[in-house]
Amino acid sequence: HGLTVVGVDDDEVQTCGARRRSDRLLREYARGEAKHGETPQSHRSGRLLHVNRRVSAADAFDDLVDAADPDALGDSDDNKLGGSSQGWLLCGLHTCGDLAVATIQHFLESDARALVLVGCCYNRLTEVGDGGPRPVWATPASDTAIPEPTSNSSDSPTEPRFGYPLSKWLRARDPPVRLGFTARTLACQATSRWSLAAPSKSTATVKGDATPRKPTSVFARHHYRALLQLLLVQRGLVAHARAFSARASPEQDVIVGRLPAAASAAGFVEYARAALPRLGVDCVPDSEGGGPGVGTRGGGGRAIVPELALAELEAAYAPREREVAAVWTLRAIAGAAIESLILADRAAHVAEHGFDVELFPLFDQAISPRNMVLVVTR
């Protein structure tokens, strides 16, 4: 379509991969044109350029343009991205946490004609008054920190701010509408995918028990995570696990992180074997793990747990998996309402600055659960 696109990513690996894909697609497109007797790029003047850098609300659009190989954009104003005769659109696809807010701020302070924004990772949003992480803004040239805001009381479109709440509409509520980390995490749930999750056909057995395990339900990993927490509590290892979990905070408790799908396919024992080492706990043969309820310390400051204890815990609490599924379902259903509140706050914030705003589903939610797009035009 003859458009010039600047793709910005903070991850160098992702940027390099995008460059390779772009080069491959351009070569394939050129071969297709040559096959049909066309001069390569004869009817196109646009370019796809990649920039590897971290973006904050303190950046100006010109900073990103200058980093995007200015020579490739040409010398004339007509060919310069962002030039006075060029209209441009700012697009953020699945912008994580406060990056969505930074993208909105970029739009408000720029002369872009439109904004297209799909957010994600609401759990990573900063929030006024929740005691969690504070906004981090830095100028790209010097990395000098801009003074942190204490609230979102300013209406300046360019002032750094917390990721939630943004709008006057929500900031004026008394008492304030606070979410917290747990609620923001619920907003990330993908209930639309539950029906697509096929049960595991695994019949793996636990060491010492030849009984095949039943197929893993869609809620099994939540049940196993609850069992893992119970194990840590019973053995007095919560503080130990939190110390080994680098990303943990008092509010977030113990963070295991994402495990391979196979970890929950063969029962709780295999799940625990995959998860516990991340928390400084090793599974050992039954004779080395101490008695019930004891988290015996191993070498290097690590704790140990006998493997038999894992199987016993799984058997004792197997009937309660349905309870975990019921509770998780009720919590997850609330996630859609929380996500709607966050998105409505963003839409209201932009509308309060005098722009036309639309908010509607763009993707099939089963394919992309974060499917709501914010479209703003001048």
Image: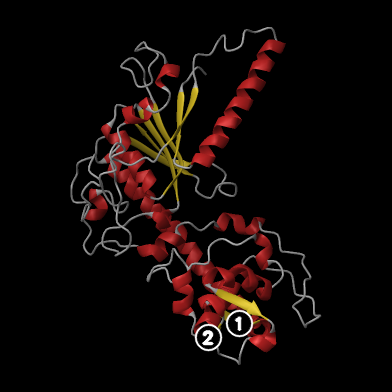
Q: Residue at the location (59% across, 50% down)?
A: 366
Asked if one can make out residue 378 in the rendered structure from this viewpoint, the answer is no
Mark 1: which amino acid?
Val
Q: Residue at the location (24% across, 38% down)?
A: 353
View extreme (left): residue: 154
**Residue 310: image x %, image y %?**
64, 81
How far is mark 1 from mark 2, CA to CA?
9 Å
- Callout 2 crowding tier (Cα within 10 Å): few <14, some 14–19, many ≥20: some
Kindly identify which numbered label has been placed on residue 305: 1
Q: Residue at the location (52% across, 86% down)?
A: 234
Q: Is residue 180 left or right of residue 264?
A: left
Q: Is residue 48 left or right of residue 138?
A: right
Task: Work out whether mark 1 precedes mark 2 in sequence or the reverse, and give the earlier one.
Answer: 2
In depth, the one of 364 and 133 nearer the eye is 133
Instruction: Look at the image and tell me in which quarter the C terminus lies.
Output: top left
In depth, the one of 22 and 108 nearer the eye is 22
**Residue 303: image x %, image y %?**
55, 80
What is the secondary structure assignment of the residue under circle 2?
A: loop
**Residue 352: image x %, image y %?**
24, 41
- Quarter occupied by residue 363: top right
What is the secondary structure assignment of the residue under circle 1?
A: strand
Q: Are marks 1 and 2 in contact (CB under 8 Å)?
A: yes
**Relative to 125, is 92 above or below?**
above
Kindly identify which numbered label has been placed on residue 240: none
Mark 2, residue position: 235
Mark 2: which amino acid?
Arg
